[in-house]
Image (cartoon, rainbow, N blue to C red):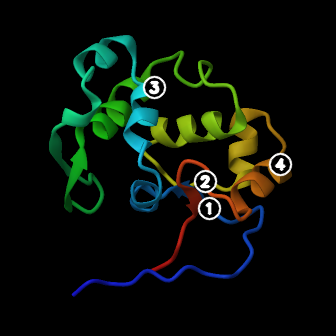
Amino acid sequence: MNEIKRYSIIKPTLETPFHIDFDWWKNHDQNWRVYLYSFLCDEHQEIYSNVENSPKIDWVDPVTAEVFIVDGIQHTLMNHCAKQSEFIEKHTTIVNVVFGIFLSNGNKPLTPEQLSSITGKDAMTILRTFSGPQVYRGIRPLQSK
């Protein structure tokens, strides 16, 4: 049975946690893999030079022990490339910086206030950017289940 996800109409606040909703992003942007590829380190850009042939990988959530099938580029990016010291500095727009933070922290949800303390960007600017009608790179408020 397919579960239909309903999204809240409650307006996010500075205390609302955000994350990358990879499912939303994959369903709404045909170029999501190309964008992920652009964040790979040089070594992995060479390995994944054929973006469309990225393997699927079994990934075990370290907290819940649930097994998920994830895209190889996404897994490599989050577990290797995003851990490199120069990763965040390399990406300068607010969308890219926040996206990079979520990649480097394993997509752990963060509030605009927390993101502000990491990026030095204004928390209200972060909130306005990611709570408006346009969704950037799948960054959305965390939905409670």
Q: Which residue is mark 1?
A: 17
**Mark earlier in primary sequence (2, 1):** 1
Question: Residue at position x 54%, y 35% from top?
Answer: 100
Q: Is disc 4 surrounded by few (<14), some (14 to 19) or many (20+) residues within 10 Å?
A: few
C-alpha separation, residue under disc 3 versus residue under disc 1: 26 Å
Whether tag 2 and tag 1 are in contact, CB under 8 A, the answer is yes
Tag shown at residue 110: 2
Q: Which residue is mark 3?
A: 38
Tag shown at residue 125: 4
Q: Secondary structure at mark 3?
A: helix
- Dot 3 amino acid type: Ser
Question: Residue at position x 72%, y 69% from top?
Answer: 12
Asked if 133 appears above or below 22 in the picture, the reply is below
C-alpha separation, residue under disc 2 versus residue under disc 1: 5 Å
Q: Secondary structure at mark 2?
A: loop
Closer to the eye: label 4 or 3: 3
